[in-house]
Image: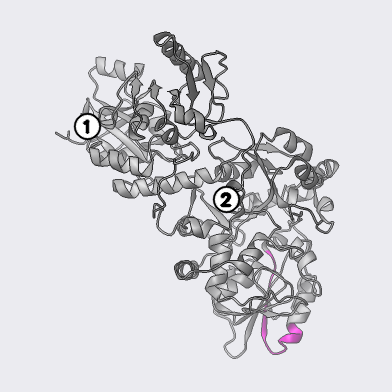
Amino acid sequence: MRPSPPLSLLSTGRTIRALKSQIEAATGGAFVPPFRSGAAAVWGGDGFTAKTLRRLGRPVLTVAPGPVLSPYDSPATGLASLRLTLGGVPMGGASADPALAGRLAGLRLHGRNRFPAGPGGAPAEGDHRPHGAPSCEERAPVALHADARARSTDGPPTLQSCEADRAAGPDLILLDAAATPTGNRAFIARVLARHPETDFTVGSPEGCSELGLASPRLRVLAEPIDPWAVCAHAARVFVSDAASACTARLSGAAAVEADGPASLEDAYGVGLHWFDPWTRAPIAREECLEKVAWLRARFRDNDRPTVLVGISRWKRPGLDAFTTGPFGPPIHAMAAEEAVRLAPPGARVLAWATRMPERLEALCREADLPLSRVEDGFLRSVGLGASLQPGASIVVDDSGIYYDPRRDSRLARILKTAAFPPGLVARAEALRRLVVERRLTKYNVGLADESGAWPTDRRIVLVPGQVEDDASVRHGSPVVRSNRALLEAARVRNPDAFLLYKPHPDVEAGFRPGKIPEAEALSLADRIVGGLSIVDLLDRAHHVETMTSLAGFEALIRGLTVAVHGRPFYSGWGLTEDLAPNADRGRRLALDELVAGTLLLYPLYLDPVAMKPCSAEQLLDRLSEERDAAAPSALALSRRTLLTMRARYAVLNPIVRLLRARRGVGPGAQDAPPTIAPSDRRTSDKADPA
């Protein structure tokens, strides 16, 4: 019988506070200040706090993890399932019935799901993904995942690579990934004592590198293993915790010796609640399982150790979430020699394109380390990168980088060669319509102009300014190379038009070069529209003249005509008026094919609230919410923050860049043209804040 929901709940610790919204949603109760009457919510239920509260006669709401979590779950980011009991009685929810066991076995989902896919360890491909999430085929061209699939098999031996061992049916000690090394060593000692004549293989879903065991009876697998693949081929499986026992049982292990409950029903019983891994809202069990399966697939995409190079500290939380996988979080380095020295066997190196050390490419080539460049994606944030606003999308490119046309980037290769099936194009069309409908752009800053003083009898032409030392301008706009030259060309081409000149936000804020004196700009343009939202301007304009600005792509998806004086990624496909020499790409694309390649196949997306990978459509929801909650401003910066950033760029950044230059990092290191190498890689130099 379900108990009545408590009217009030008391928090007993940091974990409960982090899970507050989920507990309230599941129970219908509400947390109140300390020392008020109500049920005390306790994590786990077996600790000192819970026992003390029970002795005092206080009702205790026990909160524990449910049977399925995503690899990215934590109390701080939300848990996909919880088990709630009040005074030992299930608090609502559902039971761990046989149907759930069958579904988990079919999806190979259970516990933290932080392990790699072993032979036979991946479920049959299905549609286990959130709404709008790409299928495996749609994601195939992304370099981050292409690198993963091409991973070398060199490195420490694992149980998955030992067919003879699996055929012989080893006795496996499957360790609790959440236990301490001390606890796991004690469990292994107990197993050895109970079976003195038996040799064992020891493994864990999250690796055993810190176990520190040396015994002739033990074969310790340092790297993470897929317990579903391993347990199914073991003669016997020895486990210390209920979660590992359930995994072994669900995988079809022949025999399981456990120190605790070994079945799903015994381990979890009833009172199970299921949540959206991103929003933490209660959802149906099947929907939750599909979303966790999608996140597990994203986690497994990072199936090799990763070294990140040149990542500023303020960017690291997001990049860590993008690149953490079964082999743990990424290793950070700044210098080329440090990156290669720290790289474990089978690792890959990802470098921020503008901060890549000069010697990194050559050293990676010598060490046979795959190297890719990382940059912000095209739907990024509410606020500028120059103001240290973290990005919610990235591109990972093993060929070039999208803003430098000197060599084909992975995006260019996608657009040149990819097949665009009808389902993908339909999804791209729906995404494009959502972007336009929600009035979203890369940075989502700027004010709306409500003056109404716009001409109705003249063609309105928008001229977006750019940062003049940007790599896309220096390498991608061979004729028109400055904002003044762009304005002059636009006026010559549109003598009777009403020209709007919009300075680049970073230039307008005083962070970057490219400023045109006001009087000089107004001698060519009819109006300077600095500080205004690019979406508001595109709504009013008929045509855009640009060098390589992303505003040209944003204009295309809104149905405007675009004349391009440079060679940005969206030019040369028959959708723009291409004015630069050698702009033709040799293929004609429909608009939504361009959108599919640019917004679906090339970037990766991160929910900036949950800090978990997400689909493009999910990110649109977050950006819309954040943009609507923020007070409109020209740069999404307060005056104090703006002054602080100007001081930073004027004083601190030159010092930082000088120190980087001494290590071979900086624009000077990347100005050289790309070299021809067996790996077909090169450096780039799009300007980036420190």
Residue type, mark 1 in image: Pro
On the image, the x and y values in percent for residue 360 come to 78, 44
At 46% from the left and 71% from the top, the residue drawn is 422
Q: Which residue is mark 2?
A: 145
User: Which one is nearer the viewer's eye here, 6 or 86?
Assistant: 86
For residue 90, which numbered disc appears in the image? 1
Q: Secondary structure at mark 1?
A: strand
Say which of marks 2 and 1 sits in front.
2
First along the sequence among labels 2 and 1? 1
Q: Is residue 237 left or right of residue 152?
A: left
Residue type, mark 2 in image: His
User: Which one is nearer the viewer's eye here, 455 or 592?
Assistant: 592
Q: Quadrant of residue 477?
A: bottom right
On the image, the x and y values in percent for residue 41 come to 31, 29
Give the CA distance from mark 2 to mark 1. 42 Å
Q: Quadrant of the N terminus?
A: top left
On the image, the x and y values in percent for residue 514 come to 77, 65
Q: Is residue 643 left or right of residue 414?
A: right
Q: Is residue 598 magenta?
A: no
From what the image shows, is residue 229 above or below residue 524?
Answer: above
Q: Which residues are magenta?
A: 491-504
| Residue 449 can be seen, yes or no | no
At 51% from the left and 14% from the top, the residue drawn is 217
On the image, the x and y values in percent for residue 531 come to 63, 66
| Residue 264 can be seen, yes or no | yes
Instruction: Estimate how packed mark 1 is, as few (under 14), some (14 to 19) or many (20 or more) residues with alpha carbons within 10 Å.
Output: many
User: Which one is nearer the viewer's eye here, 592 or 2?
Assistant: 592
At 44% from the left and 41% from the top, the residue drawn is 120
Q: Secondary structure at mark 2?
A: helix
Q: Is residue 496 magenta?
A: yes
